[in-house]
Amino acid sequence: CPSCRIHIPSRRSLRPDPKFDLLIQHICGDLDALEQQEEKEIEQLNRTKHMNNAAQESRRRGMLAQAVNRQKKLTVQQQQQQQQQQQQRQSGDSSSNSTRTTSPTTPMDTSSTTTTLDTTF
């Protein structure tokens, strides 16, 4: 079935059957009223069956609050780690600045180094 994915032996089963519809209408009467009545009964059953919806909703809210707090805690820890790393970099930069000498830097000449591959096996 395309809507509920239940196995159907053939596509013929999906075709409308006016004779069967007429038979059901004679047995049950007004089908629209019957469907509305069934929907009301199902809705009422769901309400009585799930009377603890307030407790479920409370649990769901609590879990969401825990997730938010957990995320906040992780971001605070990450920010603290970043601040510590920045402080370490700054303290490392200030100590290296005092010991640094001004010497001209030259780029490394890579043309003089050659690589040879040993192709003998």
Image (cartoon, rainbow, N blue to C red):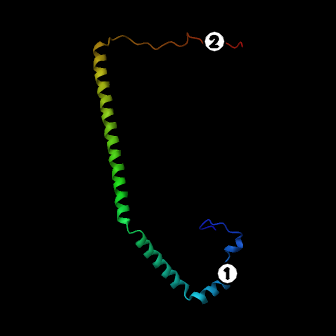
Asked which secondary structure carries label 2, the reply is loop
Instruction: Indicate which disc, 1 or 2, sits on the residue closer to the N terminus.
Output: 1
Q: Is residue 26 left or right of residue 88?
A: right
How far from the left and from the top, in percent, is residue 80? 30, 35
The residue drawn where x is 30% and y is 30% is 84
The residue drawn where x is 28% and y is 22% is 91
How far from the left and from the top, in percent, is residue 40? 45, 79
Q: Is residue 20 left or right of residue 55?
A: right
Residue 79: quadrant of the picture: top left
Amino acid type of the residue that numbered disc 1 sits on in the rendered structure: Asp
Q: Is residue 30 left or right of residue 44?
A: right
The residue that mark 2 highlights is 116
Estimate how packed mark 2 is, as few (under 14), some (14 to 19) or many (20 or more) residues with alpha carbons within 10 Å.
few
Quarter of the image with the C terminus is top right
How far from the left and from the top, in percent, is residue 109? 51, 12
Task: Tell me if label 1 and label 2 are in contact, CB under 8 Å.
Answer: no
Estimate how packed mark 1 is, as few (under 14), some (14 to 19) or many (20 or more) residues with alpha carbons within 10 Å.
few
Q: Is 105 located above or below residue 40 in the figure?
A: above
Q: Is 115 located above or below residue 31 in the figure?
A: above
The residue that mark 1 highlights is 17
Residue 47: quadrant of the picture: bottom left
Camera-side mark, 1 or 2: 1
Of residues 52 and 109, the one nearer the viewer is 52
Residue 103: quadrant of the picture: top left
The residue drawn where x is 32% and y is 37% is 77
How far from the left and from the top, in percent, is residue 73? 32, 42
